[in-house]
Image (spheres, grey):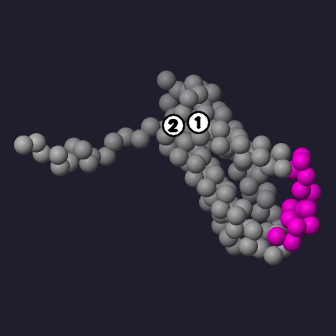
Amino acid sequence: MTNNSPTTTDLDETAVSVRIKIAGLWTSVLFVFAYVDIFALFRADVVNGVLAGKVHIFAVDQTFLFLTTLYVTIPSLMIFLSLILAPKINRWANIVVAAVYAVTIAGSCVGETWIYFLFGSAVEVILLGFVIWYAWRHPLS
């Protein structure tokens, strides 16, 4: 009779690749991105603006929707790119893209008074800080 119960070695911690950590961080950023935007649809000011064809100061048109899609596509691609790029390119792509996104997210908080938005943005910036930190520490060889 064979014993199929797990042994202690089956339950031991294993090292997680830095690439997997970075990909996981990008995934987390996108989840927070999505939920903060979804929760905005519960705000009367946002809904009324959208119904009037505006998001903040921007007209909702082909250009706005394309640029918004592009803005979300880049971190979406970073999940996969973090797993496949050569180490040196991986490092700099993650550092640069994460830094740019952290600045744009912080910029979106200017004038914002809703706590959920500020909190979500802070979480996104912290997660992107970890992307930069892990990318910087990742060995190039």
Q: Is label 1 in a helix, a strand or a loop?
A: helix
Badge 2: how crowded within 10 Å, few (<14), some, or many (20+)?
Answer: many
* Total residue callouts: 2
Circles 1 and 2, Cβ within 8 Å, touching? The answer is no
Which secondary structure, mark 2? helix
The boundaries of the magenta stretch are 47-64
In this rendering, does residue 136 appear at all? no
Query: Residue 89, which numbered label?
Result: none
Q: Residue at x 59, y 40 (%)?
A: 79
Label ID, residue 19: 2
Residue 99: percent from the left, percent from the top?
A: 69, 45
108 or 79: nearer the viewer: 79
> Is 4 left, or right, of 30 in this rendering?
left
Mark 1 burial class by Cα count in 10 Å: few <14, some 14-19, many 20+: some
Q: Which image quadrant for residue 1?
A: top left
Indicate which label's residue lies in the foreground, 1 or 2.
1
Q: Which residue is mark 1?
A: 80
Three-letter code, disc 2:
Arg
Q: Position of residue 41 (x, y in %)?
A: 75, 68
Residue at figure coordinates x 86%, y 72% from the top left: 48
- What kind of residue is marked 1? Phe
Tell me which residue sits at (24%, 44%) in the image. Answer: 10
Q: Could you say which is closer to the camera, residue 129 or residue 71?
A: 71
Q: Residue at x 92, y 57 (%)?
A: 59
Is residue 85 visible in the rendered structure shown here?
Answer: yes
As displayed, is residue 88 above or below residue 9?
above
Q: Label 1, label 2: how many angstroms apart (C-alpha)?
A: 10 Å
Q: Is residue 51 magenta?
A: yes
